[in-house]
Image: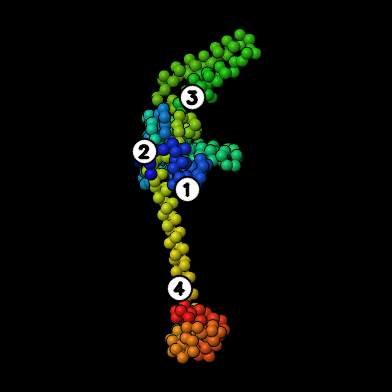
Amino acid sequence: MSKLYKLKKWLTLQEAINHISIALDEPVTEADIYRFALDKHLTLSVNFVNGTCAYLGQRDDSDKGLGAYKDKFSQDEINLLNDFWLPFLLDMTQVRSIQGVWDLTLLGSEAIDLEFNYQSLTSGLEVTLVGLEGVFVKKDDVYAGLLTDFEDNEFQDGSKAYCEKMEQTITIGLTSPEKEKIRKDYNDKRVQYLKKREKQPEPERYFPSGGLDEHDYTFVVRTSELNRFLKSLEEHELDDVDNTAVLQHSFSEKKTNTEAWKNLYKLAEKGIEAFPEWQANQRKPQKIPMDQIDRWLAETIKATKREAETIKKIIVEIFNV
């Protein structure tokens, strides 16, 4: 393991791919990482390079906590498509700034983002699912529901994004009066929007993010999580070896308990016990013809031709005939 690796708290996506490929001695792709994450084998994280805004909260699996959550936020309830209530409470009265590395929970639209990336790299199919719950990440026991500023919503009249979009519609083919009319229209809406925004409480200036792409982020993998992932693969491999050994032992036990095996064992014991005395009475004890041993076994221990052949091989090895 690289000395520099030990100093890193997280790796970029490409660094993680390279590290896993070397550790497993087989190629790993970006699509593989998305699949590992979606299948809950590996926790993928994001680094908010320029920071972002979010509601913060903590996990609460108790019925009391969920009940209080439903009562408090009955108008802004967060629930998944399968009607499963998110097991954490978010303080929706205060917008917080977060930055750095946070783990994906895969409880909201971030899961759709990963599926989109995976399908783009593999099947080429377009993922058309839409998440209504928001995007959720966590750090230790703190959960965050990501927020997007209405200023960045191009469908909000008067927002910065709306004005930029309108400016892009002004083309060379328009006359100067037409261009001025468009600019005056969106500038008027801009003034109205800013006046309204000044009077709004801060939480009303934001809405739940529809996806990770509404934020400045990069995918990363924590080194502690990468080590856990690789260790789990080693343990899985050891389990496979242990299971194989158990199966082999079980097969051997079944084999030796069969009547056919027991009978052959008894005949072999008789032949091995009687062979030294018979061998000593032969003219050339160390050069006895093999067919002569076969006949002796058939006459002495009543072995069949096939049994005699097997027992003879055992005797030849033991007595070096």
Q: Residue at x 48, y 15 (%)?
A: 191
Please provide percent x and percent y for residue 285. 47, 86
**SS of the residue at dot 3?**
helix
Seen from this angle, which residue lies furthest front? 284
- Give the spatial CA distance, label 3 vs label 2: 39 Å
Residue type, mark 2 in image: Leu
- Give the spatial CA distance, label 2 vs label 4: 51 Å
Q: In which quadrant of the rendered image does the N terminus lie?
A: top left
Please provide percent x and percent y for residue 55. 39, 33
Crowding at label 3, few (<14), some or many (≥20) Cα neighbours within 10 Å? some
Foreground mark, 4 or 1, reads: 1
- Mark 2 and mark 1 lie on one chain; the one further toward the N terminus is 2
Residue type, mark 4 in image: Glu
- Mark 2 and mark 4 lie on one chain; the one further toward the N terminus is 2
Q: Which residue is mark 1?
A: 25
Seen from this angle, which residue lies furthest top? 177
Residue type, mark 1 in image: Asp
Q: Residue at x 37, y 47 (%)?
A: 62
Please provide percent x and percent y for residue 156. 51, 23
**SS of the residue at dot 2?**
helix
**Closest to the observer: 76 or 182?**
182
- Give the spatial CA distance, label 4 vs label 3: 71 Å
Foreground mark, 4 or 3, reads: 4
Q: Which residue is mark 3?
A: 152
Instruction: Report the disc number at residue 253.
Output: 4
